[in-house]
Amino acid sequence: MTRRPWTADNGDGTYRNPVLNADWSDPDAIRVGRDFYLTASSFSKVPGLPVLHSRDLVNWEIIGQALRRGTDTPRPGGGVWAPALRYHDGRFWIFYGDPDEGIHVTTAENPAGPWCEPYLLKKGLGLIDPCPFWDDDGRAYLVHGWARSRAGVNNHLTLHRMAEDATGLLDDGRLIVDADRLPGYRTLEGPKLYKRDGWYWIFAPAGGVATGWQSAFRSRHIAGPYEDRIVLEQGDTDVNGPHQGAWVVTGPEPPDPAHPDGRGHEPERDWFLHFQDRGPYGRVVHLQPMRWGEDGWPVLGDRGRPVAGHRKPVHGERVTAPRTDDDFSGPGLGLQWSWNANPDPTRWALKNGKLRLECRPGPEDPRLRADVLTQRLPAETFTASTTLTLTGGHAGLAVLGDTYAWVGLEHAPGGPRLVCRADGVDLMRPVPAPEATARLSVVVGPGAVCRFHTGRGEAGAPFQATAGPWVGAVLALFAGGEAGHAEFGGFTVTAMSGDMTQRGRSNDSTL
């Protein structure tokens, strides 16, 4: 059995952060009964809006995706921005903003799907980060933020009355938090709306994803006025910009996940999930203990600073992590995979334990092709491997971000050959490969420095992976060219040999 590249559960009743050590951007989470569910931004990935499940907020697995289709061409940085996940009236709901279209809604009875075709709730440019709220009196509301790049304004939170069944908005909206009037605030976004003991709470980050902080706002009235407090910031830790997430509660089932405190306030029933922007690794997810201070304000982490680890919220659950391997035995791809855009179903197939990709004309740059299969970097250090057989064109294993590199095979006038390229430039002299087969791997080391390998050894110079627009780098399988096809064998991702980060107790003093 191969070692997972990362597990957060230390196996002794404690966990280490991040609990999801991959690009699960803009997470939102809820509890329904004994189960926790999480979704995250997917931007232009297809399928999109992944749904994860956990019993303890530490060990997570992917159970489905809410969006089956996207656009026919890649939209780097576009598509599905920060979603909100809620459970109401016996159904799961996801609200998300597309900054170029508006606010969309999809719903399902089963979080694993199927989810309904998303519908447009509010049309407009720059409408982002929506969150619904159903109040005790049956009234429904929607709060959202703004993207300056499309709307010309940000740092504002807007509230709407909403139809109880979320089929429409009932007013033009009102500004409830104007952070331009708050000293030091910039880029207030990602609001999540809750209620506790007669107070309305908005948890929202500000200051930018890599350098900002998490704030809480409270008011006795849903439309404000709201008072604010910074409740989580980097301080003297190495967790830059703790940012945007979800307040969740363990213990007896609350009446509604939008009112997550339920009845009574036991110690360490409250938890907060948030992300940290780690450049090429994307936005990884941390879990913070949360308590309520004597003054009625939440205290996150260790007195407002992120913890490196803690006691687990729930004990006894099995150790696991989102899947990374795939033996391509079907009947479908593993849920960890996404395409750059809508793939042509006639151009790929799973057969006899192989993934077959048809070579087709198009740009050599894999980032610009729809039919490129990707998954997140799953840890700081790991090795990803596959096998490739090629009958024409070119194909390989890639790392894609703002820059890209790949190792693989191409058919040239002199016959098949092994190649390794970065941004179209050879990292090594091509090597003849008469059998047109190869074992390919990439070793990702600290700082996302990548070293590509073939069965003949290391291929070329190291490559520095980079983030893409709002996303981390991804692993990718692709094929291109005028004719032929590529067949990839099983795909495996393992911890690097001797990797001391694979398992270890947290160094947090609160264990």
Image (tube, rainbow, N blue to C red):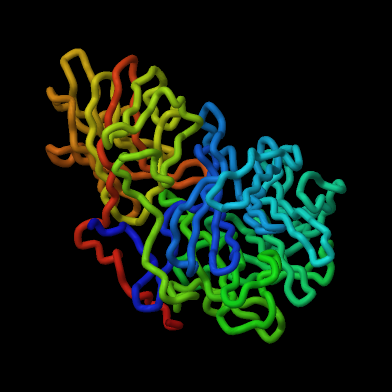
From where the camera sits, is residue 167 visible? Answer: yes
Quadrant assignment for the N terminus = bottom left
Q: Is residue 130 left or right of residue 362?
A: right
Q: In which quarter of the image is residue 320?
A: bottom left
Name the residue: 65% across, 70% down. 230
Name the residue: 35% across, 23% down. 358
Q: In which quarter of the image is residue 250?
A: bottom right
Quadrant assignment for the C terminus = bottom left
Name the residue: 80% across, 67% down. 136
Residue 95: percent from left, percent from top: 66, 49
Name the residue: 31% across, 72% down. 504
Residue 354: percent from left, percent from top: 28, 34
162 versus 370 height, above or below: below
From where the camera sits, is residue 227 visible? Answer: no
Q: Nearer the viewer, residue 139 or 283?
A: 139
Residue that sits furthest to the bottom in the current view? 294
Residue 343: percent from left, percent from top: 46, 29
Report the number of numbered marks: 0
Q: Nearer the viewer, residue 214 or 45?
A: 45
Residue 415: percent from left, percent from top: 17, 17
Q: In this view, does 405 lie to the left or right of 120?
A: left
171 versus 413 height, above or below: below
Q: Which of 174 and 484 is in front in this view?
A: 484
Q: Is residue 190 left or right of residue 141?
A: left
